Amino acid sequence: MKAPRVTLEQWRTLQAVVDHGGFAQAAEALHRSQSSISYTVARMQEQLGIPLLEIEGRKAVLTESGAALLRRSRHLVAQASQLEMLASEMDQGWEAEVRLVVDAAYPTDRLASALHAFMPQSRGCRVQLREEVLSGVEERLHDGSADLAISGLSIAGYLPQQLNAVQFVAVAHPNHPLHQLQRTLTHDDLATHLQVVIRDSGERQPRDTGWLGAEQRWTVASLGTAARLVSRGLGFAWLPEHEISRYLENEQLKPLPLEQGAQRSAYLFLYANKERPVGPATRILADLIIEHSMTDH
């Protein structure tokens, strides 16, 4: 790729001539001589090979080509300024990126609200979001690939911030044989039917949290897949209430009338990487996650 022939400073000079209404005014605004401004614009036109300004009476106005290039140059100059500002922020400890790992059971609406509030405060900081299940979150925290982590597990050696609970509901399709019993169900009733469970994404010590030891078990990779399977009559499962609200409203899923454990409250916790100092962007995002976990949206 050829190096640009026109510098950012030249584009800034042309912008000043247009914005301030002439060469003399631009020279005053930029604290330069008028001859220097005139030479810069003339040199630009020579380098680009097209006229950018033309004289009408005693005033310099943009040509059609000059107007098109000037519009594009404003984005270029703004991006360069943002890049320099980001470098300055990094020099002061502001992170270029925050790596956030979230248990798939955490409500997407709460997370989206926190990220939406973070955007205007991010100063160009990127967010790398990754979903895991159960011990997968813990492993990402231990291997250093997470700056912040939301998990339903108690992770030894870390001080967590408790977030609001997530409600899990035992459900099956309304026509499932368990509902046809038309009575309160026991765990023995469940044990003879297919249970759909979510695969732990961890590799070192995966867990079977929530599995009853049913004779048949189907393991799937995501909550969404589990909800779709169960809503089609394939087994039963404990699923987050926020994940299945649409299925409940459409009567594609129905809560199982268990004598106990029909609903489970599971608190989730926010952890920070203890191997590195928490930077200002990470701290802001953590505070917003805590704030937006307190209400459902």
Image: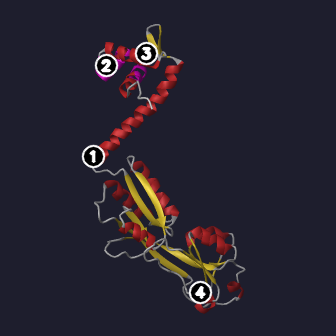
What residue do we see at 65% from left, 75% from top? 230
**Residue 159 against residue 110 in the figure, above or below:** below
Q: Indicate which label's residue lies in the foreground, 2 or 4.
A: 4
Q: Which residues are magenta?
A: 14-32
Pick whichever of labels 2 and 4 is earlier in the sequence. 2
Front-lying residue, 289 or 225: 225
Q: Measure how far apart labels 3 and 2 are at the Cα level.
A: 24 Å
> Which mark, residue 28?
2
> Which mark, residue 53?
none
Quarter of image, res 151: bottom left
| Direction top: furthest residue | 57
Pick whichever of labels 3 and 2 is earlier in the sequence. 2
Secondary structure type for disc 3: helix
**Residue 164 showing in the rendered view:** no
Front-lying residue, 297 or 243: 243
Pick whichever of labels 4 and 1 is earlier in the sequence. 1
What residue do we see at 56% from left, 70% from top? 221
Q: Measure how far apart labels 4 and 1 are at the Cα level.
A: 56 Å
Asked which colour scheme the image uses, the reply is secondary structure
**Residue 164 against residue 59 in the figure, above or below:** below
Q: Measure how far apart labels 2 and 4 are at the Cα level.
A: 81 Å
Residue 291, horizontal then vertical, whole percent: 41, 62
> Which mark, residue 214?
4
Q: Measure how far apart labels 2 and 1 are at the Cα level.
A: 33 Å
